[in-house]
Image (cartoon, rainbow, N blue to C red):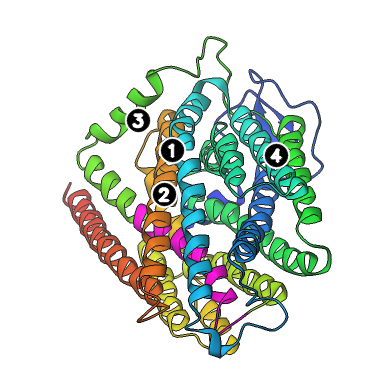
Amino acid sequence: MDDSDTSAILAEDESSDSSIVCCCFKVPQSKRPPPCSCPFSVTVEPVMFLSMFSIVLQWPLSTQYLWDCISEDVGYNGTKGGGCNASTVHDPLQKKVETLTAHWNLYINLGGFLVGLIMVTLLGSWSDRAGRRLVLIIPSLGLAVQASVYLIVMYLKLPVFWFLIGRICSGLTGDFNAILAGCFAYVADTSGRGSRTFRVAIIEACLGVAGIFASVIGGQWRRAQGYINPFWLVLATNLAAALYAYLFVPETVTPDPEAKLLSTRHHRAIFHLYSSDAPQGRRTKLWLYTICFFLVVSVHFGCSDLYVLYELSAPLCWGPGLIGYGSAAKNLAYLTSLMGLRAMQCCMKDTWVALVGLTSNIVGLIAISFANTTALMFTGYGLCFLFMASTPVLRSKLSKLVDPSEQGALFASVACVEGLCSLVSSVVFNSLYPATLHFMKGFPFIFGAIILLISAAIIGGLGCQEEKECGENREGSGIS
C-alpha cells in the first residue's frame, strides 16, 4: 500500500468546499441533513450491523425450526433425547429429514431470489437519483415484515410453506441484498480511491461482529426459550435499522423529485456499464472480477446453507449451543480478515491479499469436509480465519473501474450478482448435499474449494496483467 492509501484513510479528499458537518460527517449544503445528529463518527455501519444481526440470528434458527417441523411430520426424534449418535449415520429417517430440510431451504431461497432480483436492480440504480437513505429504509422494513410472518407461523403452528410467503414479502422490498448495495454505494460515495478497500472491509467487519453476537445469543436463547422470543428480537432489530437510517444517516445524493422507481432507465444504466469499454480494457476486467465475485460469494452462501445441517446430523450431532458457538467462530473470521487485510496491505498489493484470503478459505473447507469430531470442525473454522479478505478487494476493484456517477448502477449489478449467488448456491449445494450423502457427506465443501481455486487463478492472472501494465506505464513516463 503506497503513501496515498494511508493519507486517504486518515483524511478523505476535501475537494468540496460547500459542506456542513452533520453526524460527524461532511454533508454538502445542497443536501438535506437527517433529523437527528449522531454523536459518533459512523454513518451506515449501524444499519449494516443491525440488519446482519437479524439475518444471522434467524438463519440457523429457521433451519432448525424447519428440521424440527419436518422431523415431527415424519416421526423422527434423532436430535431430541440424545437420540443422535454415530450409529444414526445410516438412519433412513434422518436422511429423509436432511433431504426435505435442504429442499425447503432451496424453495425459500429461490422464492426470495426471483422476486428480489428485479427489485434490487431497480432500487440500487434508483438510489443514484432518489438518494441512498431510501434504499436502506425500505429493505429493513421488508425484513421486519418477513420476521412478522415467521412469528405468525410459529404462534399458529402453520405449515412451513408460509416461510416461503414471508421470504417473498422481503424480496418485494429488495431483501438484505438491497441493504448491502445501499451501504457499499454509500461507502463509495464517501471514500477516496486509496482508502476504499479498507472502508469496504470495515463494513464487512460489521457483518462479522453482528454475526458473532447473534450466533452466541441465538443458540443459547433457542435452547432456553424456544424459537418465538429470538424472532421478536429479529423484528425489533430490523425496525431499529430502518429508524436509524431515517434519523441519523446523512444523504450523499441530491434527491431528484422526478426519479421514478419503475423505469427501464435503471436496467439500461447497468447494461451500459458492462458494455462500454472506455477506458480501453475496462469491460474485460469488469466482467472477470464480477465472475470471480460470483464464484467466491456462491461458495460462501452455499457452504453457509449447509453448516447447520452438517452439524445437526451424525456424527457431530450438535445441539443449539454448539451450533451457536460454531456460527460465532465462523463469523469471527470477519474481524480476523479485517485485521489481516490491514496488516497485509502494508507489504503487498490488494491482488495478493485476495489470494491469501482464498487460500485460507480453501484449506478450511477441506478440513471441514473431513470433520467427524467437534474439535476438527472448529479447526476448520479456525483455518478460515482470512476467508473474508477476498471480497472487500473484489468490491473495491470493481468500484475503482467505474466513474463516481456509476457507483449506484455498479452496486445494483453487484447486488443482482449476490442474489444470483444465493439462487445458484442454494440449487447446487442443497441438491448436492443429499445426493452425495451415501458416499461422502462433506463432498460439497470439497466442491466449494475447487470453485475457489478457479477464482484464485483468474484473480492471479489479472494481478499479473495489472503489474505488467503499471510497469509499462512507468517505463513510458521515464522515457517521456
| Left or right of 424 on screen, residue 304 | right
User: Which residues, given as a range, are shown in magenta?
Assistant: 294-317
In-front residue for pair 368/258: 368
x and y percentages locating residue 360 in the rendered image: 44, 75
Disc 3 target residue: 270
Disc 1 target residue: 114
Disc 4 target residue: 144
Q: Secondary structure at mark 2?
A: helix
Which residue type carries mark 1? Leu
Quarter assignment of residue 332 = bottom right
CA distance separating discs 1 and 3: 18 Å
CA distance separating discs 4 and 2: 22 Å
Q: Which mark is residue 423?
A: 2
Residue neighbourhood size for the residue with mark 4, other residues' Cα within 10 Å, grouped as few (<14), some (14–19), many (≥20): many
Check if mark 1's residue and mark 2's residue have beta carbons within 8 Å: yes
Residue neighbourhood size for the residue with mark 3, other residues' Cα within 10 Å, grouped as few (<14), some (14–19), many (≥20): some
Q: Indicate which disc, 3 or 4, sits on the residue closer to the N terminus.
A: 4
x and y percentages locating residue 441 in the rendered image: 42, 78
Q: Secondary structure at mark 4?
A: helix
